[in-house]
Image (tube, rainbow, N blue to C red):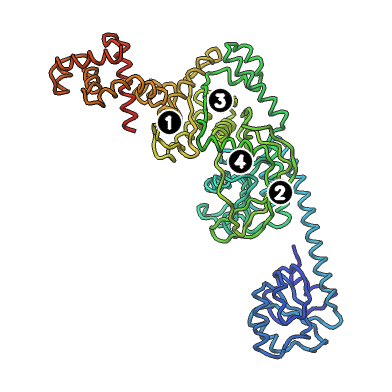
Amino acid sequence: MPPTLASLVRHPGLKLSVLAGEDRLETPVRWAHVSELADPVPYMDGGELLLITAMQLKAEDPDEMSRYVRRLVGAGVVGLGFALGVKYDEVPPALAEAAKEEGLPLLGVPRRTPFIAISKAVSAAIAADQYRAVTAGFEAQRELTRAAIGAEGPAALLARLASHVDGWAALYDASGSVVAAAPDWAARRAARLVTDVERLRSRPGPASIVVGGGGGAGATGAEPADDTAVADRVELQSLGTGRRTRGVLAVGTGAPLGTAERYAVHSAVALLTLTTERSRALREAEQRLGAAVLRMLLAGEPDHARAVAGRLYGGLLDAPFRMLVAEVPSGGAAHQARMASSAADEAPAPAQAPADATTAGTGTSVSTGTGVGTGTGTGAGTGMGIGRSTGSGTGAVPGTGPGTVPGTGATMAAEAGAAVGEPEPADPLATLADTMEAAAARTGESVLVVPDGERLIVLAPDGGSAVEACAEHARAVESRRGTKARPRGRGAAAPHGDELVIGLSAPAGPIAAAAAYRQAEQALSVARRRGRMLVEHEQVAAGSVLPLLADDAVRAFADGMLRALYEHDATGRGDLVASLRAWLSRHGQWDAAAADLGVHRHTLRYRMRRVEEILGRSLDDPDVRMELWLALKATASCTST
């Protein structure tokens, strides 16, 4: 631990005596500083032991000494050393009384003890403390590394980390779910931080958040008696080499981390980042392999696809699967975010300034700074890349394709509460891929994730957790939109960041992969027209066909087909459009349609002949009647929107 006033008093070579503030001698000393200025406060940083001879002070003036000591205490000076036998043989009563009133420790320095000896003692103690911290940090790094490469992987690493920081640790995957925690009770504590984890994940990495204050369970690492009200201090660190967060590490303690504990957290962040990021060569190889497997399936070669997939994706092809096609419509906010995300993944993550302070109570503070880091060189190009999840539920699940970033490390959290800018919009396709891969990893499923331009194609086991996670993700997004269905007319505004649409096929096997792909594309088209985020193939035939007419091409066809009738009616020579609509709605029944219009049936017959003459089409043709009816519906939909 750093030197304290008590340790200096106990130093046999200094012979210091305590004249005031006996109850505050355990205060740490950051440095020993000599100043004879009447006001040294502008030159203080806080935490100093100030050494004086009182040559320039009115040490016998009570009012002057009261102001002097009060200013020192306000500046964070932790103690005052007074040289005896230089100007004064004893400490002036005015100074001693002022120190007692303000609670400032006052130490008597004998004439035979030079100030430089005190400075050397403080410096040596600080250096020794730093050496111990570095040594402990290296030992922690070795232990954490052994744990990370062991059979238990991240779970063992978290257990070692919790022991080193004398608190608890938890790991969240790319979707923000808790995948491992140590000790076991910490999983409940970590689950209550999901909102803070989500806030951190929305920020470009690397970043960190500090939540809570001192005291509580983290101080001893024991389970609190009341797990619903924990006053520990939790530091959340993002994991990943790019700007997209691949996971989050939570560390809970009873007080701000010391130097040795900080080194341990730095090491854990670096090691966990390495476990959540695969090498560029491996990622590119899996990308090529997954794309080849999908091409073979769609080409009707399931046997070849199964042979190429081997153990990597072979289990996925042994049972019914669902095929998912997702896309981000071009021009929307999410499409622009995706383009920006791809560019950002290629760029190095910005360096961040370290910071370390404490947030008391239940407040939070945010930092986008990194401290010590371990350089890596992983990542693959732009976009998401091929993803495969076959985990057993421990460890963060790797996302997809970050750019090459030279360096990553733990963030020394900004406990002083420094604010950062607005979070960047997430890439919807990347978020969906992370969500499904993370869910699959927790249950040991295999999923095949293939980017296809501005689309994402996923093969996932039917009835598995990946498909369910996709459905839950869609429900959550649509809930944020505030509606379950929102048709997107020509004048409809695109929803910011939620333009992702997904089509899901019916269960299929490898031999029917091409049919499943067509089903997914059909469902995707219906989702796009209905304003839904997710439509399953079974839902394609549900509802009305009319929402499918909400398309610019269909409306253009309808406008062109009926334009001549609208122009005729605009001259006031008859209401042909209304007459045609009434006649078609009554299935060609003259009397019923004429009654609806309030005209004689002969008048209606004349109008229908005029419709045939103007359009050059025969109403006896059922195809013509169908096209005219759909055109009327399409133009009516356009008018209503």
Q: Name the residue tied to disc 3.
A: 458
> Circle 2 sits in a helix, a strand or a loop, which is it?
helix
Where residue 27 sits in the image (x, y, percent)? 70, 70
> Circle 1 sits in a helix, a strand or a loop, which is it?
loop
**Residue occupying image coordinates x 72% and y 36%:** 378
Where residue 13 sits in the image (x, y, percent)? 85, 74
Q: Name the residue tied to disc 4.
A: 180
Q: Residues within 10 Å of mark 4 (few under 14, many from 20)?
A: many
Q: Label 4 sits on what residue type?
A: Ala
Q: Label 1 sits on what residue type?
A: Arg
Closer to us: 81 or 624: 624
- Regarding residue 394, the answer to whether it shows in the image is no
Q: Which mark is residue 631?
A: none
| Quadrant occupied by the N terminus | bottom right
Which residue is outermost to the left?
600
Closer to us: 89 or 551: 551
Which residue is outermost to the bottom?
60
> Circle 3 sits in a helix, a strand or a loop, which is it?
strand
Task: Report how far apart the C-alphas of labels 3 and 2 lie in the structure.
Answer: 35 Å
Q: Is the residue 317 above or below the residue 620 in the image?
A: below
For marks 3 and 1, give the one nearer the viewer. Answer: 1
For marks 3 and 2, give the one nearer the viewer. Answer: 3
Q: Along the polypeptide, which appears first: circle 1 or circle 4? A: 4
